[in-house]
Image (spheres, rainbow, N blue to C red):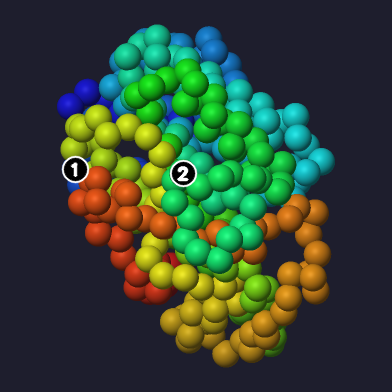
Amino acid sequence: MQNIVVFGASGQLGQCLKKVAEIKDINFIVFPPETEANILDMDAISKVFEQYKPAYVINCAAYTAVDKAEDDIDMARKINRTGAANLATQCKDHGAVLVHLSTDFIFKGDKPYPLIESDVTEPISVYGLTKLEGEQDVISILPRHYILRTSWLYSEYGNNFVKTMLKLGAERDELKIIADQIGSPTYAIDLAAAILDIITAGGENFGIYHYSNEGVTSWYDFAKGIFDLAGSKVKAYPIRTSEYPTRATRPAFSVMDKAKIKKTFNIEIPYWRDSLAVCLQKLK
């Protein structure tokens, strides 16, 4: 197996890829520091490709500050669209396959059923729009790509909902959590394992795939699961989105259908609460 190079290695998913690679004893995966692998710097990217000669590139780099993106559209677009296009161009020039991470935010979230890969995309935030533009550029530049859309990502690394809830639960007696946004949490360790399984299988089933943990929940029920499994005594109360306005609009229902990725790659996906229990145990 030739090298796998990860861009955005210091982020949550990048750190999970490091951990899973250690567990699976995959020693041909490379994590260049951001100082050498800025996806907006074509010269820097080119040097990484020339040095490591990757067969696969995983793009974990993204602008993910959803609310901030509403007022910082230029930077969000540079990272989420131009950066993705830069990597796709280099992959094309060097004969590499790109694994590009995307999001459920490319959907409007107004359909009451799990979304398949070919469903109409209609982002309702700058973040969602720029991630969709990144997808479209990757598709137009590079036929040999995997685009993995995921949702509600968390792990023992980085900043995420689980760690925020644990922190707030330890500081406060009660919390109000949004209960009318529905989706599927994703343990980033599970996603990292799926990515590496797809790569090491060595096939050519390129295209768009959905990946999240199995099951459906609200942010409120997700928080309740965190508190229950962690033994927290904090009281959680459900509220509507309208009671907690944010700069960016979120999809109300962004559950994604995973049948395609499970069938194509024979991947078993854990139930969200089971993976949450694993993560909480590691955080202890």
Mark 1: amino acid: Asp
Q: How many discs mark residues in the rendered view?
A: 2
Which element carries disc 1, helix, strand or loop?
Answer: loop
Could you tell me which residue is drawn at 75 percent across and 29 percent down? 74
- Image quarter in which the N terminus is found: top left
Specify the amino acid type for callout 2: Ser
Residue 14 visible from this viewpoint: no
Where does residue 97 sit, x and y in percent of width and height? 34, 24
Q: Secondary structure at mark 2?
A: loop
Residue 163: mark: none
Figure quadrant of residue 144? top left
Q: Which residue is mark 2?
A: 118
Residue at (35%, 69%) from the top-left corner? Answer: 271
The structure residue drawn at horizontal position 57% and vertical position 73%, both measured from the top left corner, is: 218
Query: Image quarter for residue 58?
Result: top left
Label 1: few (<14), some (14–19) or many (≥20) C-alpha neighbours in 10 Å: few
Q: Nearer the viewer, mark 1 or mark 2?
A: 2
Residue displayed at 64% across by 64% down: 252
Residue receiving disc 1: 25
Please tell me whether residue 248 is drawn above or below residue 280 in the rendered image.
above
